[in-house]
Image: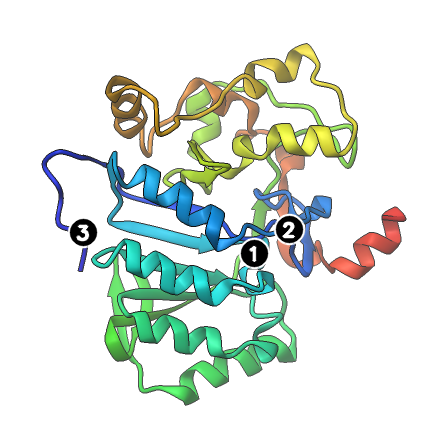
Amino acid sequence: MQNKPNKNKLILPFVETMITYACNLSCTGCTNYSDYNMKGSVSWKKGKEWLETWLERLSIPDFGIMGGEPTLNPECEQWIYGVRNLMPNSQIRFTSNAVNFSHKPEVLDWCVDVGNTVFKFTLHEDKPYAKDAVDYVFGKHTWKPITEYGINRWIGPNNTRFHINSPTQFIKTYRGKFGSIRPHSNQPKNAFEICIQKTCPLLYEGRIFKCSSIALLKRVLHDFNQSVTNDWKRYTDYNGIGPRSSDKEIEFFINNFGKPQNICAMCPSKDDKDSIIDHRTNVIAKKQWIKLHNG
C-alpha cells in the first residue's frame, strides 16, 4: 500500500531520517559516520515538526527510520506510531543492527501493530545476539517468503515484511581517517556507480539532502575540529532543499532522485581501492572505539 498521490503535491519516492546519531557499533566506512562516535537523538516533537512541514509540500510514499541505532532513541515507539499517524498510507522502513534487540524486542510489535512496514536487520557480525534476534522474529510470528524488487524477504501479519541484510563490504566516502578526512575528486557518474545511497535522501535538521554522507559532513568536520578547507567547501556549501524551497528547486531534487549530481564527486569510484572496506573485519563495539581514541 502506498500514499494516494495528492495532485497538489510533488512526490518524492523515498526519504529516511536518523532518529539517533549514536550507534553501539563502530564500522569503518559507515556512510552515517557512526565510526566517528556520533552522539545524540532526535525527539519525536522535533521530528513531527519536520514532517508536518514537509507533508504540506510533498507526498512521501515510503519513509525510513534508522540511526545510528534507532532503538537507542528513548522515543523510538513515539516515532513509529507518530510517523504512521502522519503518513497513514505510506510504507515505513525500520532498520536496526540487532545488537540492542534483546533489550527492546517490543520494537517488532510496534512495527507489526502499525502495519505496512519493512522491519530490517542489518547484521554486521556473526555473533550469538544476531542469531538470537533473527530466531526471535521468526518465532514470534508466521512468515512466508516473498521476493520484492529482487529482494528476498518474508511477509507476516498486518503486511509487515522482514528483511535481513548482511553486508560484506562498506565504501568509505572520504580519503584519510579520523580527524583528517579529505574528499575524493572523481567524475560524479563514476562515484555514483558504486554508491550504496543512490536512492536514500536524508531528512536532517528539517532539510532534505541527497544522502547522509553529505548531510552530516559539516557536523563531522565541526565536531572533530577540522577546518573547512577549499577542497571541502564546494560540498559543505550544499544545503539540500528546505520546506520553503521553490517548486522549481524541489522538482529539480526529485528529478535527480537516483541520479548522480556534482556533489557525488566527493566520493570514491571503483578505482579507489583503499575506500572499499572488507566490512566483517572492520566492525568493533563502540566502547572499544572510545577506548582506542580516548573519547
Residue 83 in picture, x, y percent from top left: 35, 57
Q: Are marks 2 and 1 in contact (CB under 8 Å)?
A: yes
Residue at image location 25% in from the left, 76% down from the top: 158
Question: Which dot marks residue 168?
Answer: 1
Out of 101 and 182, give the one closest to the viewer: 101
Q: Is residue 28 left or right of residue 51?
A: right
Question: Between disc 3 and disc 2, whose residue precedes?
Answer: 3
Residue 32 in picture, x, y percent from top left: 58, 44
- Local SS, label 1: loop
Question: Between disc 1 and disc 3, whose residue precedes?
Answer: 3
Q: How many marks?
A: 3
The answer to whether residue 270 of the structure is visible from this angle is: no
Q: Which residue is mark 3?
A: 3
Q: CA distance from mark 2 to mark 1?
A: 6 Å
* Badge 2: residue crowd in 10 Å (few <14, some 14–19, many ≥20): some
Q: CA distance from mark 3 to mark 2?
A: 38 Å
Nearest to viewer (mark 3 / mark 2): 3
Question: Between disc 2 and disc 1, whose residue precedes?
Answer: 1
Q: Which residue is mark 2?
A: 278
Q: Is residue 227 left or right of residue 57?
A: right
**What amino acid is found at the position of numbered circle 3 in the picture?**
Asn
Q: Which residue is farthest left?
A: 7
**What amino acid is found at the position of numbered circle 1 in the picture?**
Thr
* Badge 1: residue crowd in 10 Å (few <14, some 14–19, many ≥20): few
Out of 28 and 168, give the one closest to the viewer: 28
